[in-house]
Image (tube, rainbow, N blue to C red):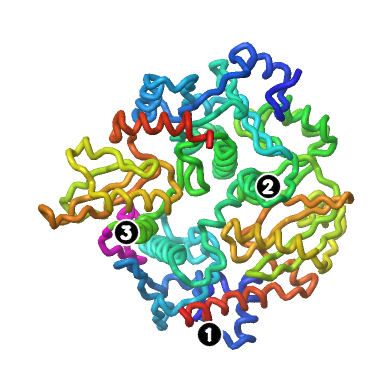
């Protein structure tokens, strides 16, 4: 049995559940927006994990689950809680349910895509960059500082420099320009991340199990996700095939971070150097699949189902 | 003017470094808060044992806007240099070991941000601290993890699973949607039973002298396995005696990656001093 968690209409989640249906997989969905009608508990006794999950009228034994796809939104921001005051019984139940669910998922022997602990390396991009380097990828020259003079010399040294968030909080990648100079004093309180701009072609590699899907992106924008806004033209995406050695290195990178499913952001320079910018542990793959028809959601579904046979043998 | 090998610095920063230090020497750090009596005790103790040069770096001083930070990632690796307001310049290329007891970035920094940016500022600072602490070379006790700057933090359910896997007896753990989250911070010992905290470090367990007990060897080994499973170089493990007399079993009650090191006394300090000064040479 596979457990899918999140908002069923969210595109990546819907794509995976459509694939599971097409593959006749047995699955249930925990719809976050119906948390009020759900309940669960788990126990650890003698190293054995047991428990129950109630979704409306349906009750599942936790041991039944061999694949889990959690794609949860922040439960505190669910629209159903909008009118609920802090600490209300509904809010407490919602928080308690999500905490119990997440704690169980971290411990479950099922195929989980992905667990929270390995996803956490993405909470600090420069930290993750240090892990990425160990796998032999180049990472952009990076400066984190609260000293405006260092930023100026970094820009003088590299010419084009971008700045972006260091944490997992999403930011739009921007190029540092002369106009920003006056604002540089504002970094005194909080060291900020600057990177040398790397020329080349963006390639997003989705790894899932032993499969890899590579997509090349053509765009003049600094951040191709916002190409229409930054360059006045949407990015163009096309499927590409990775050299076997690079594919293996991408798979090894995901494995080393403990991720079953990852979106790896690469840039291939005109000199054929391969830079890795980050590994996204919760990739919104639907954008790439929608543009290229690469069957990423099918691979996710297959991986979730693989957990079934592994567990059945065990 | 050049800086440390592989590390470009500005003239001003370089002058400050050379004014204060001989390039041929190395240094050790104790990173803690001014209110962390255990961290301050460790600093004094290591200094007494001759770990030198030993620099005390207080979280509060790192939180000052006058503290200058330079953290780089380049083809040679990750580098860190920072200059607290007291005039010192601390450079990663010369650090050989550190006691890391920073629980998080000083909250005072994020409080400077506008209300709408505070959460973002906190996330950015946490990301920065995780990265620069990870860039410290040599022996770092404890190395940072995404779940905790001074060592991996685990939820009570994970600790219970890890402790059982390591071979420590653990009471059954139960969690449900209707439980109050606070209860998962309570000791796992039965009500009314006081647990003893021990320190697991480098395959040994310290603190028995404090309670006048000597833990049986299988329990010591299980504690070592728990620390290994938790990827914590040094950690506190709470145990209680389940049953009286020779039948009593030392059982798991709790764990932390940032324990009060005073529990381990001088034997722990000596071992830490040895690890700091010799551990990085292997």
**Residue A208 horizontal/vertical position (percent):** 65, 68
Residue shown at 15% from the left, 51% from the top:
B192
**Residue A72 horizontal/vertical position (percent):** 54, 65
Q: Nearer the viewer, mark 1 or mark 2?
A: 2
Which residue position holds label 2? A133
Magenta-colored stretch includes residue B182? yes
Q: Would you place residue A93 above or below residue B45 in this image?
A: below
Residue shown at 36% from the left, 24% from the top:
B45
Q: Residue furthest left?
A: B245
Per the image, label 3 sits on a secondary structure element best described as loop
Q: Quadrant of residue A10?
A: bottom right
Per the image, label 2 sits on a secondary structure element best described as helix
> Image quadrant for the N terminus of chain B?
top right
Q: Are marks 3 and 1 in contact (CB under 8 Å)?
A: no
Which residue position holds label 3? B167
Magenta-colored stretch includes residue A227? no
Residue shown at 60% from the left, 57% from the top:
A256
Which residue position holds label 1? A26
| Lower position in the chain sequence, tag 1 or tag 2 | 1
Q: Is residue B270 visible?
A: yes
Left or right: residue A304 versus residue A57 is right
Left or right: residue A47 versus residue A161 is left
Q: Residue furthest top?
A: B19
Q: Quadrant of residue B162?
A: bottom left
Of the pair A172 and A308, the residue shown nearer to us: A308
Numbered range of the magenta stretch: B169-185
Q: Would you place residue A269 above or below residue A112 in this image?
A: above
């Amino acid at each position: 049995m596979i457990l899918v968690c999140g908002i069923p209409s969210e595109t990546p989640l819907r794509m995976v559940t459509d694939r599971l249906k097409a593959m006749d997989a047995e699955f249930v969905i925990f719809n976050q927006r119906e948390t009020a009608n759900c309940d669960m508990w788990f126990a650890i006794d003698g190293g054995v994990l047991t428990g129950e999950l109630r979704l409306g009228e349906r009750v599942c034994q936790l041991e039944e689950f061999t694949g889990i796809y959690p794609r949860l939104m922040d439960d505190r921001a669910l629209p159903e809680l909008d009118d609920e005051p802090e600490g209300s019984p509904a809010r407490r139940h919602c928080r308690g349910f999500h905490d119990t669910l997440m704690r169980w998922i971290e411990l479950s022997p099922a195929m989980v895509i992905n667990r929270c602990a390995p996803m956490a390396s993405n909470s600090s991009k420069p930290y993750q960059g240090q892990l990425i380097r160990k796998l032999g990828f180049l990472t952009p020259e990076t400066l984190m500082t609260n000293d405006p003079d260092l930023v100026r010399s970094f820009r003088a040294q590299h010419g084009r420099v971008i700045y972006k968030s260091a944490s997992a909080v999403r930011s739009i990648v921007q190029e540092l320009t002369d106009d920003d100079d006056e604002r540089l004093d504002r970094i005194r309180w909080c060291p900020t991340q600057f990177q040398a701009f790397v020329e080349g072609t963006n390639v997003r590699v989705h790894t899932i199990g032993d499969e890899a899907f590579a997509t090349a992106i053509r765009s003049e924008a600094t951040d191709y996700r916002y190409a229409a806004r930054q360059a006045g033209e949407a990015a163009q995406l096309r499927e590409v095939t990775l050299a076997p050695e690079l594919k293996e290195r991408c798979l090894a990178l995901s494995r080393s971070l403990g991720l079953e499913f990852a979106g790896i952001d690469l840039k291939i320079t005109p000199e054929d150097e391969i830079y890795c910018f980050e590994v996204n542990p919760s990739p919104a793959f639907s954008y790439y699949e929608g543009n290229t028809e690469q069957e990423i959601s099918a691979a996710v579904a297959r991986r979730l189902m693989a957990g079934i046979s592994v567990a059945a043998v065990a | 003017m050049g800086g440390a090998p592989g590390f470009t610095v500005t003239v001003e920063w370089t002058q400050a470094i050379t004014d204060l230090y001989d390039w041929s020497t190395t240094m050790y750090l104790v990173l803690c808060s001014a209110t962390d009596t255990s961290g301050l005790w460790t600093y004094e103790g290591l200094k007494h044992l001759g770990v030198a040069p030993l620099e005390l770096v207080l979280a509060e001083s790192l939180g000052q806007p006058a503290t200058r930070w330079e953290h780089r990632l380049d083809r040679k690796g990750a580098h860190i240099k920072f200059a607290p307001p007291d005039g010192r310049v601390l450079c990663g290329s010369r650090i050989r070991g550190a006691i890391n007891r920073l629980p998080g970035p000083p909250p005072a920094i994020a409080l400077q941000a506008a209300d709408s940016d505070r959460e973002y500022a906190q996330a950015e600072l946490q990301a920065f601290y995780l990265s620069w602490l990870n860039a410290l070379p040599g022996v770092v006790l404890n190395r940072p993890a995404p779940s905790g700057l001074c060592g991996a933090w685990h939820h009570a359910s994970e600790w219970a699973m890890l402790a059982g896997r390591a071979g420590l007896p653990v009471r059954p753990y139960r969690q449900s949607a209707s439980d109050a989250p606070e209860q998962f911070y309570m000791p796992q010992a039965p009500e009314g039973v006081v647990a003893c905290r021990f320190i697991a470090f480098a395959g040994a367990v310290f603190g028995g002298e404090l309670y006048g007990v000597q833990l049986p060897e299988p329990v010591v080994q299980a504690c070592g396995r728990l620390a290994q499973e938790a990827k914590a170089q040094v950690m506190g493990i709470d145990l209680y005696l389940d049953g009286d007399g020779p039948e009593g079993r030392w059982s798991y009650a709790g764990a932390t990656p940032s324990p009060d090191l005073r529990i381990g006394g001088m034997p722990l300090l000596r071992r830490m001093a040895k690890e700091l000064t010799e551990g990085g040479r292997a």
